[in-house]
Structure formats: C-alpha cells, structure tokens
Amino acid sequence: MRKKITVVGSGNVGATLAHRLADKQLGDIVLIDILEGIPQGKGLDLLQSGPIEGYDVRIKGTNDYADTANSDLVVITAGFPRKPGMSRDDLLKANFDVVKATTAQVVKHSPESILIVVTNPLDAMAQTAYRVSGFSKNRVIGMAGVLDTARYRTFLAEALNVSVQDVQGLVLGGHGDTMVPVPSYTTVAGIPIADLMPKEQLDKIIARTAKGGGEIVNLLKTGSAYYAPSAAVAQMVDAIFNDRKKVLPCAAYLEGEYGINGLFVGVPVKLGARGIEQIIEIKLTAEEKAALQKSAAAVKELVDIIGV
C-alpha cells in the first residue's frame, strides 16, 4: 500500500512541495487549505501533470480534514508569510494560532503520523506542535537545518568556484538570525574550509547564511522562499519513507543534549522510518558552543512568550 502524505497549506511552499513529492512518487498526496478552490485547483493541475511527468500517485485538494485521515506523514506549511522588514519572530503569535489548530486536526485524523513543521518561526512552531499533539519526540520534526545548510553550501561553492556537491557543512541552532553554521565541520571534498578560505571571507558567508531567508524576502517584495524549503522537506520525507537512516540537521526536541533541555533546536539527527531515530552529538569548538547556546536562548524567549 502506498504511503499517504498530507500537506497543510497550498501556498507556494505547500504546492511546490506537493509537486516535488509527486515527482519522487513518495506517496499519495492530500493538499489542504482553508481557502476554497485553491487546493482543489492546484491538486487537479498536479494530477493532470502525471501522464506527462510519468508519476502515478493520487493527488487530492480539499478543505476537509476528513480527507487527510490516516496519513503516514503530515507537513505543516500553513501560516502567514514574512513581509519585507518583518523578522520571523514577528510572525510568532499569528502563526501560533494556526499551528495549534492544525495540529489538533492532525491528531484527530492521523494519530499515528509523523509531523514535519515548516511554519515560521520554526523552532517555536515545532514546539507548539509537539505540546499540542502529545506525540513522542521522534515524531515531531522541524525543517530548518537542511534548508540553512543548503544555503551555506551554495554560498561556499559560489565563492570557491567548486561543485556544490563537494561542499559539506552543517548549520545548527534556531532557524533565524542566531543560526550556527559550523566551520569545524565544513569541508570541500574532505579538505577543511580553513585551508581554502580566509576567516574574514567565511565570516561574511556565515552572516549571509543567517539572513538567507530575509535576502529572498527583500528581493521578492511579496512572499518568501519556496523552492529550496520544499526541496528540503522532500529530502526529509524521502529519508523517512525509504528508511535511509540519513544524517541531516533538523529541529529536534532536546533533553540535555548539547546542554540544552526542553527546547526544539537544530542539531544533526538520523532520519529513518520512525522519524528521528537518533540525535547525534558532535564536538564543537568553544566559539561554536557559545553560539549554539545563544541560539537556544533566542528560541526559549519565543517559546516562553507563547507558553509552550
């Protein structure tokens, strides 16, 4: 039997994600939104692409959570988008209500599902979904590190004029201005980044990575990034459904790891059929440790505001 995936929110991120999931034939897809006609129209359009693209999955757009019943995995993309000059944190209270209501519907209709949260501010929204759902911590995952790491690797590859496939790196911490790219685990074909680039140049790339989402928001004027975020989620879904045991940076609920307790923070995890199957602790430099603690403190401020 094919897997069933629900994508909550049929805006740019949700609809593009549905397209990527269909292309990879990862499962049947339900696209749900509160707006009437939008998920139905986009779902039908995607379904009609199947004979041309060669995918053979069911795609349904709906406004009724009953159609999402018994989903194996649910991705929450619904929420208000960022606008120019708006930080992710400005979205906090508006999107808290959206994620809280959405999660309650997920629990009602798909109590055995794995939940991936994309809505910003991401770490606080993942924590909201975790508290509201009552799911075990391995079944609630925040998408952030995969996207932030992709941006980091892209900027490094551009600067060095090398294949992006040769660039390996990690971005940890909260999904925002305090995110933590980790130079000590950044390599190009196994060569440490410090051997290839002066620290001043690397610091500029790290700063650009932290503001990567805002850079796109400012360019678009209306709306925010969706190609790379949807690609990041699709990679996570693929790792889970194909039980790849893939090590990816994701927002996970920490209970003492890295000296952080009771918060969703981006760290390397092993993704497999059960969701987060292992939280991997790596050795960080003193500077990286301090940056991660600062990032966790920023997440805690948001979590405290909404009381989750």
Image: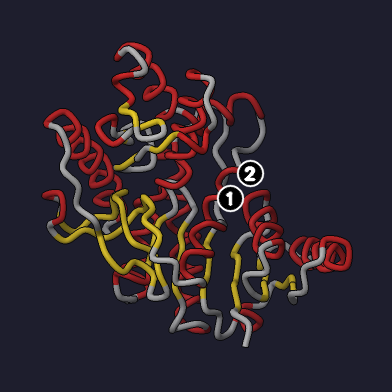
Mark 1 burial class by Cα count in 10 Å: few <14, some 14-19, many 20+: some
Q: Which amino acid does label 2 sit on?
A: Tyr
In the image, residue 262 lies at what x, y percent? 19, 59
In the image, residue 19 lies at what x, y percent? 71, 58
CA–CA distance between discs 1 and 2? Answer: 6 Å
Relative depth, front residue between 98 and 45: 45
Tell me if 288 is positioned left or right of 167 in this view. left
- Tell me the quadrant of the picture where the N terminus can be found: bottom right
Q: Which residue is drawn at 24% across and 32% down?
A: 184
**Secondary element at tag 1:** helix
> Residue farthest to the bottom?
1
In the image, residue 249 lies at what x, y percent? 36, 50
Q: Which amino acid does label 1 sit on?
A: Ala
Q: How many marks?
A: 2
Quadrant hosting residue 234: bottom right
Relative depth, front residue between 153 and 117: 153
Label 1, on which residue? 231
Q: Which residue is drawn at 52% across and 70% down?
A: 74
**Secondary element at tag 2:** helix
Q: Residue at x 50, y 82 (%)?
A: 110
Q: Which residue is drawn at 62% across and 70% down?
A: 26
Mark 2 burial class by Cα count in 10 Å: few <14, some 14-19, many 20+: few
- Tell me the quadrant of the picture where the C terminus can be found: bottom left
Rendered view: 270 above or below 266: below
Label 2, on which residue? 227
Quadrant hosting residue 301: top left
In the image, residue 285 lies at what x, y percent? 15, 33
Residues marked 1 and 2 touching at CB (< 8 Å): yes
Rendered view: 294 above or below 43: above
Identify the coloring. secondary structure
